[in-house]
Amino acid sequence: MSGYAPVRASVRGGELRGAVWEPAGEARATVLAVHGITSSHLAWRWLADALPDVRIIAPDLRGRGGSRELPGPWGMAQHAEDCLVLLDEVGAGPVVALGHSMGAFAVGALTALAPERITGVVFIDGGLPLPQPEGVDPADVPAALIGPAAARLSAVYASPEEYRGFWRAHPAFAGVDDPRLDAYADYDLRGSAPELRPTGRVEAVAQDSLELQDEDPILARLRGLPAIPFLRAERGLLDEVPPLYPEPRLDRWMRELPALEVHRIADVNHYTILMSDDGVRALLPVITRAIDPR
């Protein structure tokens, strides 16, 4: 793995935390990597292992991980502002911006905020408007969208081992034995045993989730991009079919966005498209082409 160093930047309300993976020699490129709605920068560990010659800058978004205590309001515009401050703090020039899940929506907002800082994007199972759950009152949409995540974020765990067990038994990771997944789980805990809680703030997740179906602003941010590589996982958050983006939704967004390039990634789910070696191997050709399009 590339050299790993924590980073922080002064933003509204406190410090944004995250990390940078630095190559041992000269970096052939720099990327900004933005995680999903309840995740942290350590979701990018698998990619960092696979790209030892690339500088990877990865924040913990406001309300998650080491940035948990940063106050709201949250939202994609705020995440974009925070990412821009972090890029300035670490002295990054123009970057390729990668976003997983909700992180891709934040990347879309960043391209609108500072297009001169973004040379290309890659969306990993996110960034395109999600359908509103059928039969759900608008006031109940956050609960419908984040119910399982809210339950996890609100739970108390007696030990790091118990929380590791939660992730090892999760349908997306069933049967996986990977110390990187354990490290991801450990980083996501705060407090002291036997009262450990995940770092993600339910109110931040709920507010952010409201922006993931808002078609007009999402599409407006994307229409000016020359290329939108989109990597779709074959299965959803719980390793289920249909995936987060079923075919009818993809068909619609391809009509709406001529620059959209859909890559269907087999044998992965919403998590393992990024948090597994097999998933990352499937992503690498697209990410490499975004880094060096010649």
Image (tube, rainbow, N blue to C red):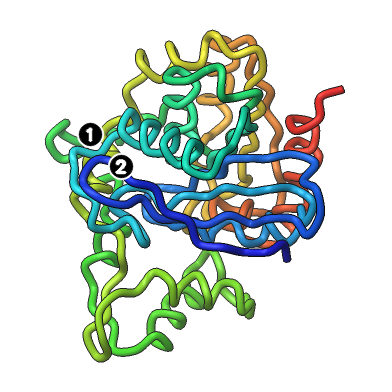
Q: Amino acid at mark 1?
A: Gly
Q: Provide the secondary structure element on which disc 1 rests.
A: loop
Of pointers 2 and 1, the one earlier in the residue sequence = 2
Image location of residue 94, percent across then percent down: 62, 27
Query: Which quarter of the rendering shows the N terminus?
Result: bottom right
| Residue highlighted by disc 1 | 135
Above-or-below relation of 184 to 101: below
* The C terminus sits in image quarter: top right
- Judging from the image, what secondary structure is the residue with disc 2 in? strand
Which residue occupies the foreground of this view, 141 or 152?
152
Q: Which dot marks residue 11?
A: 2
Categorize mark 2 by other alpha carbons within 10 Å: few (<14), some (14-19), many (20+): some
In this view, 144 is above or below 128: below
Q: Are marks 2 and 1 in contact (CB under 8 Å)?
A: no
Q: Does 194 appear above or below 229?
A: below
Q: Nearer the viewer, residue 268 or 59?
A: 59
Count the numbered circles shown.
2
Residue drawn at x 21%, y 67% as measured from the top left: 154
Point 45% across, 42% down: residue? 86
Locate residue 48, reporting x and y percent: 68, 57
